[in-house]
Amino acid sequence: MAGSADYNLGPSLYPRGWFIVAEASQLDAGPLALRYWGQDLALYRGESGRPVLLDAYCAHMGTHLTNSTSAVIVKNGEQIEGDSIRCPYHGWRYGPDGQVNDIPYHDGPCPKSAAIRSYPVVENMGCIMAWYDPDGREPDYEPPFLPEWDDPQFVHWELDHLGELNIHPQEILDNMADVRHLGPTHGAPSQYFENEFRDHIYIQRQGGPIQLYNCDLQSTTWYTGPGLLLSKQSFGETLIYELIANTPIEDGVVRCFHACLYRGASNPASAEDKATAKMAQAGALEAFGADFNIWANKRPALTIMQLKTDGPFKRGREWYSQFYARPEDMSAIHSAVNGVVLTRGMDAPSDHARELDQGLFA
Ligand code: FES
Ligand SMILES: [Fe+2]
């Protein structure tokens, strides 16, 4: 298993950014025990509806806040009070800021030193997204949002939970530059292909014939930070937004999520549209599965033997390194990588293809 240092990424072990930690509907069944960024974590929904993500272990005696479901206060549904959560062992209560705000058998102020780490969290497009920074700094960009999520013609996604993959996320990000795998791996070779780097956003525009649907496909795909890919894809009458997300669990191990937001034929989307949306997501997952299977079985590519007619892997890796770098080094990386890159042997996107970009990367 190759880790961040093997790819010359650092000094952080894990990338800074917004990541999916759960599907929002998973919280309907109660608090969750999660593990990301080498940390055990507790995720719950407060009574106001607010999702809260804390480090998992109580400062008092180290109990996991959400994994000890045998405790009576958990069984009785008494663990959540307002937006706070009580430890199941002795009932210390933690607020969404990670501070202890009540100890049932203690008079006087709660010890400030009992605070545990709280992560910035948003509920966004059916997902719980959390901001990770190794030193607890606040977010420096917004997570992506598709306005179509609020358009009744679009059928909401339910996430495909793809589980753990023993691969460093660097290799998943390499896919953005990888024009030459689209024919052999997906049966959809590109005619036009370009990448663009804009600070924390990494864009790919590509299009060409796709065997599976016997038509042309055009896509604009972009990462917002290191963990969240969205792809607007148009083929025939179909328009979808695909989501592919990776969240580091340990150094060199990620959890992956996948979904598609589908534009129905009727407005609002009909029952038939909802059925077609499920099929569209399954079809997209099958295509993505071809990558997933390759990643699951390859050896790490610590360096890439990049030909002149390959896509810009090296520039993509330099872009990705910003999320492991010291904050004061990020702007130098932006200056080095920002701009449009064409791959030798590929057409540039037409003006028509660029129209797919409208309203994206806000
Ligand atoms: S271990 Fe959490 S309250 Fe005692
Ligand atoms: Fe792929």
Image: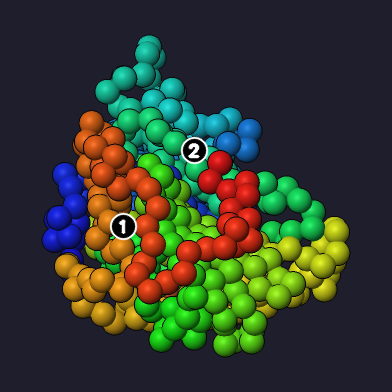
Q: Which quarter shows the C terminus?
A: top right
x, y percent for residue 156:
69, 59
Characterize the local packing of mark 2: few (<14), some (14-19) or many (20 or more) Cα atoms within 10 angstroms.
few
Label 1 sits on what residue type? Answer: Gly
Residue placed at 41% from the left, 41% from the top? 131
Label 1: how many Cα within 10 Å (few below 14, some 14–19, many 20+)? many
Q: Is residue 152 left or right of residue 222?
A: right
Q: Which mark is residue 142?
A: 2
* Mark 1 secondary-structure assignment: helix
In this rendering, the answer to whether 232 lies above or below 298 is above
Residue corresponding to mark 1: 316
Q: Nearer the viewer, residue 320 or 164?
A: 320
Q: Residue at x 67, y 46 (%)?
A: 147
Question: Please, what secondary structure does the residue beneath circle 2 have?
Answer: loop
Which amino acid does the dot numbered 2 rest on?
A: Glu
Residue drawn at x 63%, y 61% is: 352
Establish if 183 lies above or below 205.
below
Q: Nearer the viewer, residue 348 or 47?
A: 348
| Picture residue at 30% right of the left edge, 48% below the top | 337
Left of 342 or right of it: where is 360? right
Does 249 sit left or right of 153 as displayed? Answer: left
Q: Earlier in the sequence, mark 1 or mark 2?
A: 2
Which of the two marks, 1 or 2, is nearer to us in this view?
Answer: 1
- Quarter of the picture containing the N terminus is bottom left
The answer, for residue 261, to whether it is visible in the render is: yes
Q: Is residue 8 left or right of residue 171?
A: left
**What number of labels is visible?**
2
